[in-house]
Amino acid sequence: MGKTREIKKRIKAVGNIRRITKTMQMIATAKFSAAQQRAVSSRPYTDALFELVAGLAKSLSDVSHPLLTGPQKGGGRPLTLILTSDRGLCGPYNGSILRAAMAFARENPANRAGFIELVGKKGAGFLKYNNIPISQHHSQFGDKPTYEKVEELAQNYIDRFVSGEISSVHVIYMKFISAGRQAPTAMQLLPFKADALESKGDAKVAQENAGASEVYEFTPSAEDLLGELLPAAVKAVLFQSFNDAIVSEHVARMVAMKAATDNAGKMGKRLTRVFNRARQAQITTELTEIVAGAAALG
């Protein structure tokens, strides 16, 4: 009797866990749909602005900008921003980002010795365990980062970069490619790379923009255009990174909770079979005892 009671308790516990993981899966699916819509809707603007600035910067070889060439004052330290999640139960999401961050730090020792800033709670313990000090921990973004808050952070990076306090800015995050594919990425935010357009494989647009200085006259001047477009591009690209990180987190949690729900269902069926066998064995034993007792009484 004790064995069947114990198995029955385990079946009930597995059923409760399955209901919880199923609910979390449904919540993650709903959040994923909303986050994907935000990320996809902002990407055309970000890509268009990125291509415009890249093409303009490549076509104007005689025009320089601090966000392109770097700060005039030396001595700045590189800054690395790592985007992790506030909550767990999202599979390998945080582990993949933090492994990419450690690989980036091994390849770039100067970045490890520079400023390390973190978004999300899940990366704090990992960085502390690896003796990597955190310069600043940003906790103001949450699940729905607004453009105003990201713009404020990007403007802070721009001001510090222009003043020479920091020499470069890299963002390590999970890039959302599709619902079935996300990739941990180390992106250079500052200084802005003029050849980034070609690295995206859009050589045709790069060739068209290469002759822009021979065809077009800029009003206002090219310096003024870069002065307005470059900060806007930096802010838009950083905001897109946050959106990609959020939607990738929801995808990872949705997949992890679905796997947990399926495993709980399989375990429940397996325990039910074990319970039935134990119950049958118990009934057989009781019947045997009854028959044996009746035979003894004659």
Image: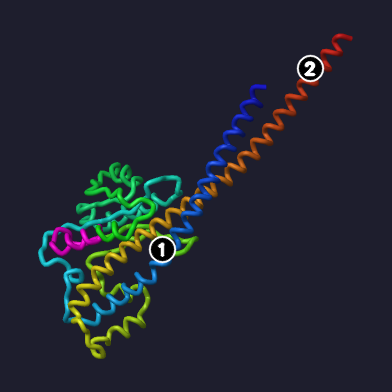
Amino acid at dot 2? Glu
Badge 1 or badge 2: first in the primary sequence: 1
Q: Quick one: SS at disc 1?
A: helix
User: Is residue 163 shown above or below 264?
Assistant: below
**Residue 289 marker:** 2
**Residue 108 marker:** none
> What range of the chain is rendered magenta?
153-169
Q: Quadrant of the C terminus?
A: top right
Tell me which corner region of the image, top left, top right, bottom left or bottom right, holds residue 61.
Answer: bottom left
Outermost residue toward the left in this view: 73
Q: Is residue 155 magenta?
A: yes
Q: Is residue 51 left or right of residue 275?
A: left
The residue beneath circle 1 is 39
Q: Which residue lies at the image location 27% right of the left edge and 61% below the top edge?
A: 151
Outermost residue toward the bottom in this view: 215
What crowding class fits label 1: few (fewer than 14 Cα within 10 Å), some (14-19), or many (20 or more)?
A: many
Amino acid at dot 1? Ala
Q: Position of residue 219 (x, y in %)?
A: 21, 84
Q: Quick one: SS at disc 2?
A: helix
Q: Is residue 184 left or right of residue 61?
A: right
Whether label 1 touches label 2, CB < 8 Å:
no
Choose mark 1 or mark 2, whichever is in front: 1
Q: Quadrant of the N terminus?
A: top right
Marks 1 and 2, how far apart in space?
Answer: 69 Å
Q: Which residue lies at the image location 33% right of the left edge and 49% below the top edge?
A: 120
Q: Is residue 81 left or right of residue 86?
A: left
Q: Which residue lies at the image location 46% right of the left edge and 61% below the top edge?
A: 181
User: Is residue 153 shown above or below 25?
Assistant: below
Q: Position of residue 200 (x, y in %)?
A: 36, 73
Q: Position of residue 101 (x, y in %)?
A: 32, 54
What crowding class fits label 2: few (fewer than 14 Cα within 10 Å), some (14-19), or many (20 or more)?
A: few
How would you classify the magenta stretch by its main secondary structure? helix
